[in-house]
Amino acid sequence: MKAPAFDYIKPRHLDAVFKLQADYGDEARLLAGGQTLLATLNMRLSEPALLIDITGIAALKGISLQGSFLRIGALATHSEIEASALVAQHAPLLSLAAPHIAHRAIRNLGTWGGSIAYADPAAEWPACLMALDGIVVVQSAKGERRIAAQDFFLDLYSTALAEGELITACELPIAAPDQLFAFDELARRHGDYAIVGLALAATRAQAGLVGVKLAFLGLGKTPLRATASETWLGQRPLTVDLLEPLLEVLRSELDPLADLTNSAATKRHLALVLARRGLTAMLNPGNR
Amino acid sequence: MMNDKHLIHLTVNGQARHCEVAPRQHLVDFLREDLGLTGSHLGCEHGVCGACTVRLDGQVVRGCLVLAVQADGRSVETVEGLTASASMKDLQDAFVARNALQCGFCTPGMLMAAAELIETQPDADREQVRQWISGNYCRCTGYQAIVDAICDVLASRKAGAAQ
Amino acid sequence: MELNGDIFIDAERERVWQALNDPQVLLASIPGGEEVRQLSPTETHVRVLIKMGPVRARFVGKILMSEVRANEGCVMNFEGSGGAAGFAKGSSTVKLSSEGRGTRLHYSAAASVGGKLGQIGGRMIDASAKQTADLFFKAFSAQLSDEAPTVAGAQQAPLSEQPAPLRSASRPEPAASPLAGEALRVLWFTLGAAATAFGFWVAATLR
């Protein structure tokens, strides 16, 4: 189907964007990668009056090291993140997750900021952001503010972004040398929406894995950190002996939402499969 | 006014073009209808089937998920350009040799996608090839012949490079 | 898609029933509700703007009430069309029971969404339906606890704390009166007719 008629503008500066948003309200949509928006328009599921193309705004671009943080600009494409040496070094979880995002043609245009603002519960970046305790940097005409990942994803396709705000970048604490990361997702075909996925981070210590963080995608209305399980483990290092008990806690913590093709029980089962696989691989002394 | 046309300047298959487009028109409709380049096809028009795959600034994209106005100042390559450049002649020959096309509807998209794989991942194995082209749907061939053709080219290019 | 739940509302059963039948209360409660118009005591026309992520789809449809037991519950059959976006149909049962000074409202619904929204939104239908139901009942309860007891034309309480994409929309159209109001109107009409007739009689007598 063809998109409905709309106006198009490509401002050079954020101030112009904010002014346009104030003038048009919900009748204007931001266009970044367009991989979600344009599909929506092609299916006539939205008929905005104006598209504000933000891909010309330099302040939103780039991947850079800023002290102890890696700053990834909102307009960084999935492919740029996939290919980035800085990301491979300082946020390797993202390098592991990137190839799972849709297909190459989508990754070449789709953006980091777009994915996080859209907050699809089956998307890879929101779960990675949660696993890394990243920070979302947003800006509006009133200025800039920072929102912790755990406070950002509120409900289905709903984030803490207020009207007139857009994501300019996210900041990720850089990986320490003894940190381990894993990412996996289960889908019927590569590139499908994940049935369930898991972003894992942990620190390798003498006695086992400490500070294990599990962030799931595809289980609920938002990406989910398994905080109860993480708290149960507490300061104790995760060893092979503690794995099954941890998974039992995880099984009772997870309360997935069913979708059209998978029951809640299936999702819970698959989540545990991913957790077991990921943690076992991390615990294996031969690993990395 | 809504849908006022925008003047865009872009390069298509190496040729400079200056055209007026309505904002709502996506890139593949522009290529097919305004420029007569009907090699790129439309299947689902929401980014999943891959029939519309073209190159924008050297990277494969879904032509149905790019607006023509967004191609202003950029370069586009379609399957017509790919053929003219002969940069993937071995791939096109392999498709014929392996019977990797029947109706041909998915073929231009397959060729564009495969070309990027061959250029960026020359060491891809069969599994990686399958993953890469999983974004291009084929209703006729059952895919195996397409994968065979791509693997043939990867192997022969590698062998050629080794000599 | 199937959905059920229950909610405690801090208002008496009669008031809750009245509110459920009040188009203006309904309009203010439905996330994205743009128009609620009562066509008959059992048929209500609805227009809703659904905002979910990037989607902005307008659905126009009707709700038919049946098995109406005043102050206790009813069955509602609904169907709506979203144009290119698709269509929705289903039915729900609402039951009210007194609980202390308030009311326990139990609802169960079964719906199918077809067309584009069903195909691509399908994986999210259950979750978004639940979210919509939650928002509806939150707004509905808020109105019942904010307003002073009135008959028809319930006041719209301001709806705070909704996630940004699901703001409730514009001014409602002047709505037809709900059941109780209808009876009142008939009464006034009759009185008016009687008064007019009396006036004529007086006038005729005085001439």
Image (cartoon, rainbow, N blue to C red):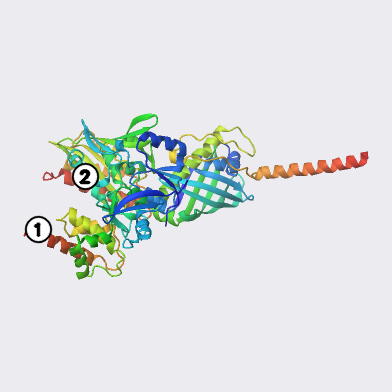
- 10 Å crowding of disc 1: few (<14), some (14-19), many (20+): few
> Please, what is the three-letter code of the amino acid marked with disc 1?
Ala
Q: Which residue is mark 1?
A: B161
Give the quadrant of residue C103.
top right
Q: Residue C171, image x and y in percent?
A: 57, 40
Q: Residue at x 35, y 59 (%)?
A: B35
- Of C57 and C11, which appears nearest the observer? C57
Give the SS element for disc 1: helix
Q: Which residue is mark 2?
A: A95
Q: Is residue B66 left or right of residue C59?
A: left
Q: Is residue A262 left or right of residue C85?
A: left
- Assign the C terminus of chain A to one quadrant of the image: top left
> Please, what is the three-letter code of the amino acid marked with disc 2?
Ser
Q: Are marks 1 and 2 on the same chain?
A: no
Give the quadrant of residue A81.
top left
In this view, which residue lies farthest toward the left? B163
